[in-house]
Image: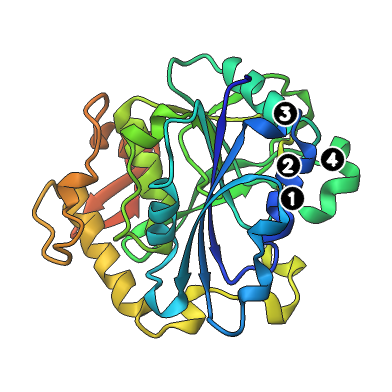
Amino acid sequence: MNASIFVQIAAYRDPELLATIRSAIDNASDPQRLVFGVCWQYIPGLDEYLLFPSELDADIRLVAVPVEQAQGVCWARHVAQNLYRDEDYVLSIDSHTRFVADWDRRMIEELARCPSDKPVLTTYPAPFRAQTSLADTPIARLKVGPVMDGSVRFEPFFDADSAQHTTPLASHLCACGFYFAQGQLNHDLPIDPVMYFNQEEFTHSLKLWTLGYDCFTPSQHLVLHQYGKEKPVFEQHVHWNDDAKWVALNTRAQIRLRALIENTFDPACDSFPVEHFPLGKARTTSQYLSLLALEYRDGELFPLAKETQATR
């Protein structure tokens, strides 16, 4: 049997979830290698029609959670990750994704082309609307964006010569809506359920760096993503619109990030102690912040002043 792939999906009331799973199956060169781990967050009596896994001829491990128990995207990714059972590869995606033909073979081959012992393929995928013109659609790379909620968000950018890239390009940032790696990653980097949305990708990227993993932007389109402008208004379900406790969860995540970076006790949550979700020891946090031209002070991240960057 060909190498197995664990596809982990956190889905929040998403009408695209079934279509996402179908697209993965229909476009795989070997659908039998796929195993899906899904955390499905739904409103009982309203959203059940969005997911009928019995309709699919697929290996689906499902945890269904009423939305009043949901605690944000990192919590849901943590639940989905815990369904992993030592498959050879792990693919983390959002529940509104489409796949190119033979994506499984392409991802494995592309990962093998990365000049690293611990590579991760990741970026912000092209939008759904690019499906008919992928050859003319540049591949996004990632850069540090605005400071927000004690962390930093990432943004896509496009090289003028992006069409010239024929091999994976080194990156230092991970997009949690699409990354692909050896399955060992799920053992090395347990997803911290205490983090919330704005802390997710920086925290994940920092942990990958300190664990000795290297991120790469793929040289070809492998999946597509449905972005906000492509969704009808009534389908834009997000946790922070449904649940007022998101403010407390977001504040708790900021405390968690501070405890992680400062290597101190996290008083915000006893259920998931911060030491169960540590940084690695292969490379340091200070090295990573310097690499991204960031500094950490007073419990928050800030861009380095340009004059400071110029002296480095």
Q: Give the x, y percent position of residue 6.
A: 53, 37
Mark 3 is surrounded, within 10 Å at the Cα level, by few (under 14), some (14 to 19) or many (20 or more) other residues, namely some
Q: Give the x, y percent position of residue 296.
A: 24, 50
Secondary structure under the numbered disc 2 in the rendered image: helix
Q: Residue at x 87, y 38 (%)?
A: 136
Q: Nearer the viewer, residue 49 or 69?
A: 49
Q: Which of the two marks, 1 or 4, is nearer to us in this view?
A: 1
* Cβ–Cβ under 8 Å for marks 3 and 4: no
* Residue type for callout 1: Arg
Identify the mark nearer the N-term, 4 or 2. Answer: 2
Disc 3 target residue: 30
Disc 2 target residue: 25
Q: Residue at x 73, y 20 (%)?
A: 166
Q: Give the x, y percent position of residue 62.
A: 51, 56
* Residue type for callout 4: Leu
* Residue type for callout 2: Ile
Mark 1 is surrounded, within 10 Å at the Cα level, by few (under 14), some (14 to 19) or many (20 or more) other residues, namely some
Left-right relation of 111 to 172:
right
- Extreme-right residue of the structure: 132
Secondary structure under the numbered disc 3 in the rendered image: loop
* Cβ–Cβ under 8 Å for marks 1 and 2: yes
Q: Residue at x 32, y 38 (%)?
A: 207
Question: What numbered label is drawn on residue 22?
Answer: 1
Identify the mark nearer the N-term, 3 or 2. Answer: 2
Disc 4 target residue: 134
Q: Residue at x 60, y 25 (%)?
A: 169
Mark 2 is surrounded, within 10 Å at the Cα level, by few (under 14), some (14 to 19) or many (20 or more) other residues, namely many
Q: Nearer the viewer, residue 157 or 119?
A: 119
